[in-house]
Image (cartoon, rainbow, N blue to C red):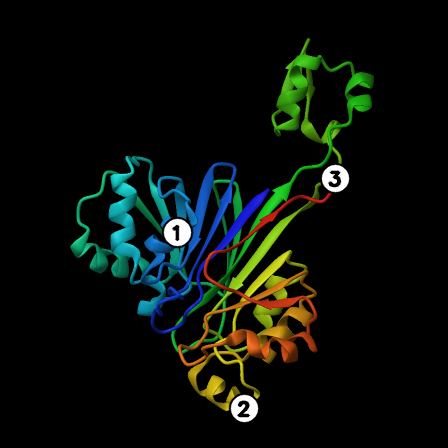
Amino acid sequence: MLDVCLLGTSGMLPLPDRWLTALMTRYNGSSLLIDCGEGTQIAIKEKGWSFNPIDVICFTHYHADHISGLPGLLLTIGNSDRTEPLTLIGPKGLSRVVSALRVIAPELPYDIECIELSNPQEHISVKGYEIEAFKVQHAVTCYGYSINIPRIGKFDVNKARELNIPQNMWNKLQHGNVVEADGVVYTPDMVMGAARKGLKVTYCTDSRPVKSIVDNAMGADLFICEGMYGEDDKESKAKENKHMTFAEAAKLAKDADVKELWLTHFSPALVRPAEHIDGVRKIFDNASVGFDGRTVELVFED
């Protein structure tokens, strides 16, 4: 299963009940963070989740409301007795940005490994997460992310018995290892069925609607997308500032055939975003307004 928590839903500046943009996932003992705006540490503490298991932090872009919480978080992770390396992923220039921010967090008990994105689409495998990073359209270079948790096929007991594979080797085959018994080599494909449907969460903020979002969100179990403006008459302002309206996000969700849409990254002027959800649901029915601390546990299909 994959735990998903929307830590912060505000764009531009934090509000008393709305921290800046951040998303956190937990899978198999490892946590992943997308963006780290001001207040992210408080949001994690409010949720009751831990800092130490954070293994990966992905950044959509380097505007302050998406990365200003990083130096303090790095220090807190260090104070949690972490010694394992931490992986940071973001657009080209990540190493330079992180180095500048670390002026106020110079000494850490763990290494930081930076993966800089430069292509329109890139794939990263880390800590059981299969991450698709895809370029979107904002005022600066910006990426969206799809977090995939693959699921292997079922182990075929009957085939294993027909092939006379010793039972003490079944577990190794299930985990993708090649085994040998009495001079005979057995490979996982001999006893494993086709891969089953995994889990997928797509996250996108600070962008105009573009095809890359639809392509990468296709069939997602959960699509978390920016809705800077809820009002229908704000489309021209959204175009000017390279953001999206609720209706535009809903159209993306419909085109990508996702299971569920959460809206996030609201303008500070959008005090009551839920007032605009009825119009969204006319476009995409299973849509709702995100809020700080909103959590879901995604589970594999039977």
**Relative to 49, 186 lies left or right:** right
Ranked by sequence position, the earlier of labels 1 and 3 is 1
Residue 116 seen in the figure:
no
- Counting other residues with Cα less than 10 Å from the Cα at mark 3, is it few (<14), some (14-19), or many (20 or more)? few
Q: Which residue is mark 2?
A: 233
The disc at residue 46 is 1
**Relative to 197, 87 lies left or right:** left
Ranked by sequence position, the earlier of labels 2 and 3 is 3
Q: Position of residue 2 (x, y in %)?
A: 56, 45
> Gap between marks 1 and 3, in whole Å?
41 Å
Picture layout, residue 179 above or below residue 289 = above
- Counting other residues with Cα less than 10 Å from the Cα at mark 2, is it few (<14), some (14-19), or many (20 or more)? few
Q: Residue at x 58, y 74 (%)?
A: 249
Q: Which residue is mark 3?
A: 194
Q: Please name the amino acid that badge 2 sits on.
A: Asp
Front one among 249 and 116: 249
Q: Residue at x 33, y 40 (%)?
A: 85
Q: Position of residue 36 (x, y in %)?
A: 36, 58
Label 1 vs label 3, nearer the camera: 1
Rendered image quadrant of residue 7:
bottom left
Per the image, label 2 sits on a secondary structure element best described as helix
Q: Position of residue 288 (x, y in %)?
A: 60, 67
Picture layout, residue 193 above or below residue 64 = above
Q: Are marks 2 and 3 in contact (CB under 8 Å)?
A: no
Per the image, label 3 sits on a secondary structure element best described as loop
Label 1 vs label 2, nearer the camera: 1
Q: Look at the image and tell me in which quarter the N terminus lies.
A: top right
